[in-house]
Image (tube, rainbow, N blue to C red):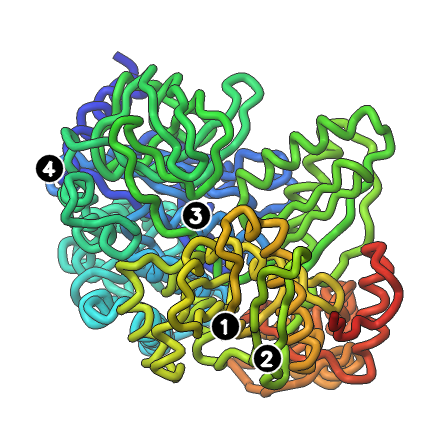
Amino acid sequence: MSKAEEMVGKIKELAKNPDQIRNFGIVAHIDHGKTTLSDNLLAGAGMISQELAGSQLFMDFDKQEQERGITIYAANVSMVHNYEGKDYLLNMIDTPGHVDFGGDVTRAMRAVDGVVVVVDAVEGVMPQTEVVLKQALRERAKPVLFINKMDRLIKELKLSPEQMQERLVKIITHVNALIDKYAPEEFKSQWKVDVQSGKVAFGSAYRKWALSLPYMQRTGINFAKIIEYTQQEKEDELSKIAKVHEVVLDMVVRHLPSPKEAQKYRIQKLWTGDISSEEGKAMLECDASGPLVGVITNVTFDQHAGNVVTARIFSGTIKEGQEVFNVNANKKMRVQQVGVFMGPRRVAMQEIPAGNIIAITGLSDVSAGDTICLPDKVVAPFEEMKHVFEPVVTKAIEVRNVKDLPRVIELLKQRAREDPTMRLKISEDTGEILVSGLGELHIEAKIERFLKDKGFDIVVSPPIVIYKEGVLKESQIFEGKSPNKHNKFYIKVMPLEDKVQEVLRSGEIPQGKIREQDKDWIAKKLIDVGMDSEEAKRVIYTRGDNVLLDMTRGIIQLHEVIELIMEATRQIIDEGPLAAEPCMGVKVMLMDAKLHEDAIHRGPAQVYPAVKQAIRNAMLDGQAKLFEPKQILRIDTPGEYMGDVIKEVQNRRGQVIEINEEEGTTVVIAKIPVAEMQGFEGALKSATGGKGFQSLIDIMYEKLPEELQEKTIMDIRKRKGMPLEMPQIELD
């Protein structure tokens, strides 16, 4: 039997025992060494050659990833590791570090129970380190820490053992501060990382060595010996006695939870259903004989197999040829094959039980985030996976050859299902295609390059910025009258409290219609962050960071039209009155309604226009304004170029927030409108002799300066083919 066959046999056996499974992700800021570390872990597990580890970048198997030298897609692999004489099945996902591909990180976090956070020993904790750790903790994935590139501290910075320890303490303290900030309350203290327990390892993935305190105690290797080996260029020898894969995978097995342990606290946070139900109990116990429930975390397309779905199975057992039900798409589907990932290839298995991250083929019309279950035991869906940042850049794509349009639209819809952080708007009449993403690179890599590689001749517009529409003050109450004049709705709007907007954006409160069983805890949460108690109890619908409140009393037929009112509200929130841009921070209050007693006279054609007209007028009366996205950036530059960097920021309507010195580098924190960001990366390289670089810390929206309001509104209206006049309040 070959080594590969032996491993497949072990994987099949271990997949049945959730106590001996660890599902984990590798997460980090860009270029901190995740994929190099992944290579070493695979080499240690016997899946690739030791010589190629670190240069093969096995997990970057997409052609673009190899060309650009960055990870674009999350990649899965299953391997076996022996810890203290016992075999464990490790299902690992290597995730991207570039902020534009953060959506892949968000989706991967739903599949895993823990993460190895990789931090560059020289750069320390960077903005994207914070973002990926926040994403992991939001999904209740427990962290451990690997401090990488230790060889650079010795060779380049020539630090003493004491200085190296100071550097490590600083990184560990910073990571723990983030855990304290973002971890669930009950795990804040026990999930912190420390050297003593072995939750921290350090080493050089590129040089293939690593250490942790338990390993040092077992082998007698210390810092002084590491420095000696490194200075004497004996890192090959060091990698034989302090194997990176052994140290890191030991840490994973020892400190990250099994699915059986993790599902007890993850399911109650991530699933919207009743945990005391049969399915709820089965998921809490990771019960392979319970009803099937799983979540799709990724969808890719294979030209031979069609859709290849990555899914985490939380209860039950999924089988080859089985019929399943997609809760989100509300349809039955048939599984062709199930298997596990071995990087770019898949190993087929006849059935796989709960607790595993698996590959499924045969499912069509599926999207990342969908919940699958048995057709005769339909369950509530899992919480929507919410990314930290929203799309802020749009590009228009035109297909030169009209006969290619249907195929391009089909491929783009498939792309949007694979990556829900990519938004797609298609006019099948005019053929205009608008693609929105997290940044220019996001659209360029996942859409432009993808279509060009498929041989399509396309024209891509310069980036279009997504603005938002909000109100500055409370409006009067406006009447919206249905076309048949038999129904009247009385609505006012006002700005939503900042803290309430934050909690809505954080994903703590579900989106859409508020379910009866959730009303009390949602009201309490809203009151806790400063909303009036009466108003908090009357929130009936959320959309983004906007809410609809039912302030009416005793209107008999209101419950029959309330869903129509919600849908009309959604339409205005998605396309505001100024320039049909999405709304932000708007509190819509239904104050009263007069309804025709006969249901036939209060259908969608009567309710929608009336409600929309009332909200639209109320927003205009509430001083509706455009809000523009701004990026908060960390800019690292040698001190001598600081003046040029500041000038570059200010020339783009940017604002310098703070300036710090960090170990010979000047760090500028700046806020720049996304509309002014085109070409900024190149300009920064030019201004700093190629030595400056930027990292995204956050994206926020602020009111567009008054002098730019009308011109920008008109530009957007012109682009969208809307009438070229400023919108006015329209009364009957």
Is label 3 in a helix, a strand or a loop? helix
Q: Amino acid at mark 1?
A: Asp
Q: CA distance from mark 2 to mark 3?
A: 42 Å
**Mark 1 neighbour density, 10 Å: few (under 14) some (14–19) many (20 or more):** some
Task: For marks 1 and 3, give the CA distance.
Answer: 42 Å
Q: Which mark is residue 85?
A: 4
* Tag nearer the camera, 4 or 3: 3
Dot 4 falls on a residue whose secondary structure is loop
Q: How far apart are the two marked residues, 4 and 2, measured between alpha carbons?
A: 72 Å
For the N terminus, the quadrant is top left
Query: Which residue matches tag 3?
Result: 107
Mark nearest the camera among 2 and 3 is 2
Q: Quadrant of the C terminus?
A: bottom right
Sequence-earlier tag: 2 or 3: 3
Q: Does residue 512 appear left or right of residue 708 in this picture?
A: left
Q: Closer to the N terminus: mark 4 or mark 2?
A: 4
